[in-house]
């Protein structure tokens, strides 16, 4: 696939989303999640982890701990950690 091109587009979109809607807007959080997923697909697990952690913290603040999007963010972070062999953190 064209993951490298997707990464560039997601980065641009995320920056615009932060600028236009703000860093805590739900669509900005979706953009963060999408970029993290693309980074993971590229094997950039350390970068994906950082993005997933940031998105998860903001999602907890904005949507609450039990919101389905927040739970999805937790799952994505755990998957990223597993891919890096960070089993203890993934639990």
Image (tube, rainbow, N blue to C red):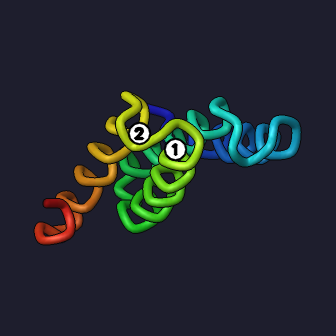
* Residue 5 in view in this figure: no
The x, y position of residue 48, in whole percent, is: 43, 57
The front one of 58 and 44 is 58
Residue 39 against residue 68 in the figure, above or below:
below
Q: Which part of the image, by quadrant, shows the C terminus?
A: bottom left
Work out whether mark 2 precedes mark 1 in sequence or the reverse, and give the earlier one.
1
| Residue at left offset 32%, top offset 47% | 74
Q: Is residue 85 left or right of residue 29?
A: left
Residue at mark 2: 70
Residue at mark 1: 59
Query: Is there a contact, CB below 8 Å, between mark 2 and mark 1?
Result: yes
Disc 2 versus disc 1: distance between alpha carbons? 6 Å
| Residue at left offset 67%, top offset 38% | 28
Q: Which part of the image, by quadrant, shows the N terminus?
A: top left
Residue 88 against residue 75 in the figure, above or below:
below
Mark 2: few/some/many CA within 10 Å (<14, 14-19, 20+)? many
- Number of marks present in the image shown: 2
The x, y position of residue 12, in whole percent, is: 75, 43
The front one of 30 and 35 is 30
Q: Is residue 20 left or right of residue 64?
A: right
Q: Is residue 53 left or right of residue 24?
A: left
Helix, strand or loop status at disc 2: helix
């Amino acid at each position: 696939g064209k993951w490298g091109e997707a990464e560039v587009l997601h980065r641009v979109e995320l920056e615009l989303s932060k600028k236009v809607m703000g860093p805590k807007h739900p669509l900005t959080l979706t953009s963060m999640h999408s970029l993290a997923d693309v980074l993971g697909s590229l094997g950039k697990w350390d970068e994906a982890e950082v993005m997933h952690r940031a998105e998860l913290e903001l999602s907890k603040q904005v949507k609450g701990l039990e919101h389905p999007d927040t739970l999805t963010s937790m799952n994505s972070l755990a998957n990223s950690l597993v891919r890096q062999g960070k089993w203890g953190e993934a639990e």
